[in-house]
Amino acid sequence: MKHTKIKDLLSGSSLLQEVVAKGWVRTFRNNQFIALNDGSTIHNIQCVLELDTFAEEIIKRITTGAALSIKGTLVESQGKGQKYEIQVSSLEILGDSDPEKYPMQPKKHSLEFLRENAHLRVRTNMFGAIMRVRSTLAYAVHKYFQENGFFYVNTPVITGSDAEGAGEMFQVTSLPLDGSAPRNEDGSINYKEDFFGKHTNLTVSGQLEGEAYAMALGSIYTFGPTFRAENSNTSRHLAEFWMIEPEVAFNDLDANMDLAEDFIKSVIKYTLEKCEDDLKQLEARLIDEEKSKPQAERSDMTLLEKLNFVLDNNFKRVSYTEAIDILKASKPNKNKKFQYLIDEWGADLQSEHERFLVEKHFKCPVILFDYPAKIKAFYMRLNEDGKTVRAMDILFPGIGEIVGGSQREERYDVLVEKMKALNISEEELWWYLDTRRFGSAVHSGFGLGFERLVLFVTGMTNIRDVIPFPRTPGSAEF
């Protein structure tokens, strides 16, 4: 017999029929009650053994983590806690799990312990829920763009250009690292002898290539892995993460802000509809976690309230200049409570400033726009004032910046001047400049770090807990 997923069994559609369920043991009580989970839902199905009908050697092998195949009749449960259960007629142990060695025992584990066992942590209720939410969000991303006329473009993972101009990139090379790599006359490494014939890196963004495709297909999006060799050991940074980057021809900054807000609301709404049980579990975890915090540090809203709050409120649009005035006059700034004090226009806003604007001042998601040109990337469109650019960041409660985007600089001469000022090679980006030489037009786009979106939707506080196998400085385990 083919097995049925536990999610489907719990719908009751196979009531009083013989069924087969396969999964992993969560708990086994009184040598009679098996809680079985197969990952299709947060809920276990209870499988009831009749006492004295199974051999002692089989009973001993039913331990937490063991994989079982169970055959029996699906019936309405007599006990509390579940609507349906399986009366077991036969069972097969597919894989044993030594209870002395299996780390995921049915008790509360610290998040740090679970990170050290990232290959097994998804067998817990919490991480099963997080990863199902992540999967649903990823589907919602594609669904939104596909239904709104966008084309999915796969931009290169290996690149010769630094889209951000930050230089914090992982180098890709086939040259030997033992000092015997070919050299130029000045002693520098001769990358013409390397695999690609030039210096190459792992991508930090697919944006530049995405722009080229938007200038032919109109509306495109990329959704793929990106890499930052930034030595940031924080709860908000990863060395490898996933980026969502739409680019749209003929969109100005206002249309870009409209798109970003509509997109975020749409994917959250879809996930709320599809992951109700998982989100309720994550909300309960958050409520339980906050009980140990002082009242002043507790969140004003539950997880589901926070998600619905984003859906129900328009994002507040505020210029960078206005935001600086608010921050300069704020109590935390005047009382020197900010780690980074705001004393002049031109400051690069930190997470503490972003969260103050969202959580304390406006009390809603905020879109900041028209940033100083000096703190933004070369490809952003210069405003008429000559000192600000058509950039926008979306700030969320608990996260800070979740989206960064801009209207791109479509004027060839202005773009070349900006590149010269920043010592960005025209020769390296000749193909990018071609998009301004041939049929240039106003266009805009943004980047959203997928893990930050998952962080927000799940209510988790450390980005390492929302990606299956986190890559961070000094850690590439698994």
Image (spheres, helix red, strand yellow):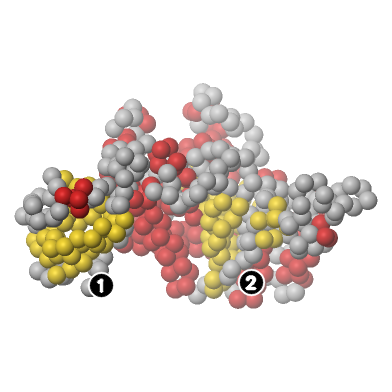
Number of other residues with Cα within 10 Å of mark 2, as a class: few under 14, some 14 to 19, many 20 or more? many
355 relative to 207 in the view: left or right: left
Give the amino acid at mark 1.
Answer: Lys
Indicate the quadrant where residue 92 lies: bottom left
**Residue name at image x 58 percent, y 31 percent:** 340
202 relative to 399 in the view: left or right: right
Instruction: Please tell me which residue lies in front, 259 or 121.
Output: 121
Image quadrant in which the N terminus is located: bottom left
**Residue name at image x 90 percent, y 52 percent:** 184
Indicate the quadrant where residue 67 lies: bottom left
Dot 2: element: helix
Q: Which mark is residue 2?
A: 1
Residue 133 spot, x, y in % from top left: 37, 56
Q: What's the distance in space between the residues labelled 1 and 2, CA to CA?
A: 46 Å
**Residue name at image x 12 percent, y 71 percent:** 17
**Residue name at image x 55 percent, y 29 percent:** 339
Give the amino acid at mark 2.
Answer: Tyr
290 relative to 46 in the view: left or right: right
Identify the residue position indicated by label 2 in the image.
213
